[in-house]
Image (cartoon, helix red, strand yellow):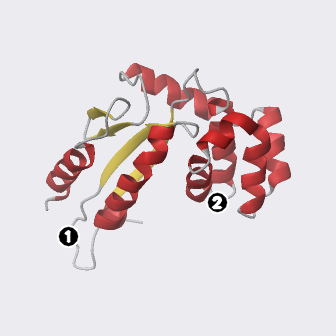
Amino acid sequence: MDNTTDSGTALSRATLDVWCELQCPDCHRAQGDLRALHERYGDALEIRLRHFPLEKHKHAYAAAQAFEEAYAQGKGAPYAQAVLGRTAELGERGEELLVEVARELGLDADELETALIDGRHLLAVDADQAEGKAIGVTGTPTYVIDGQRLDGGKSQEGLRERIEEIADRLLGR
C-alpha cells in the first residue's frame, strides 16, 4: 500500500513507540492518553507497543511473550488492554491470568500457554528491551516520537500535550 491520496499527494504519518510492560500500573494509567491520541490522529499516528519488562515485576517478561502470541493470533491490542486492566491480579496469578485473558478474548489459549513454555517470542521481547536500553529507557511508560524520548515513569503530566505538539508538527497540522 502506498502512502498517497487519490490525487497523488503524500499522506503524513508519524510513529509513537510506547515502551511499556503489562504489569506496570503507570502503563495502565497511560492507556487513556493513548486512546485519546488514537482518536485525535487515527491511522496518521502509528502507536507501537514496545516491550520493556522491569525486573521488579515478576510476571512482566511472561506477559510480554503472551502479548506477542496474542498479536500473532490477531488480537495484540485487546490483549494488552485486558492485561493492563488487571495489573494487580497479574502480580498475584501470573501465567494463569495470562492464559485466562486469552480464553476470554477467544484466542487459542492452549497455543498461548505453549508459547510461554517453548519461548518462541523470547527474541522479540529481548530485542525490544535491548533497543530500549540502548536509547536510554529506564522505566515505563516511555514514549519515543521523532527521536525524542519522553519519560512517563516518574510522571505522565504534560506528556500527551508534548506528544501532540510533536505529532502536529510531523503531520503538518
Left or right: residue 116 versus residue 60 is right
- Residue ID for mark 1: 9
> What is the count of numbered marks?
2
Answer whether residue 94 is visible to the viewer in this image. no
For residue 8, above or below residue 166: below
Q: Position of residue 58 (x, y in %)?
A: 66, 26
Indicate which disc residue 74 carries: 2
Q: Position of residue 9 (x, y in %)?
A: 20, 70
Left or right: residue 52 versus residue 138 is right
Which residue is at 28% across, 34% downward? 150
Which residue is at 31% across, 62% downward? 44
Residue 23 occupies which quadrant of the picture? Answer: top right
Q: Position of residue 81 (x, y in %)?
A: 55, 54
**In the rendered view of the protein, which quadrant contains the C terminus?**
bottom left
For residue 47, above or below residue 132: below
Residue 108 occupies which quadrant of the picture? Answer: bottom right
Rounded to the nearest whole Å, what is the CA distance between mark 1 and mark 2? 31 Å
Element assignment for label 2: loop
Q: Amino acid at mark 2?
A: Gly
Q: Residues within 10 Å of mark 1 (few under 14, many from 20)?
A: few
For residue 82, above or below residue 121: below
Element assignment for label 1: loop
Q: Position of residue 114 (x, y in %)?
A: 84, 42
Answer whether residue 149 is visible to the viewer in this image. yes
For residue 156, above or below residue 123: below
Q: Amino acid at mark 1?
A: Thr
Q: Residues within 10 Å of mark 2 (few under 14, many from 20)?
A: few
Which residue is at 36% across, 21% downward? 136
Question: Between residues 162 and 135, which one lies in front from this camera angle?
Answer: 162
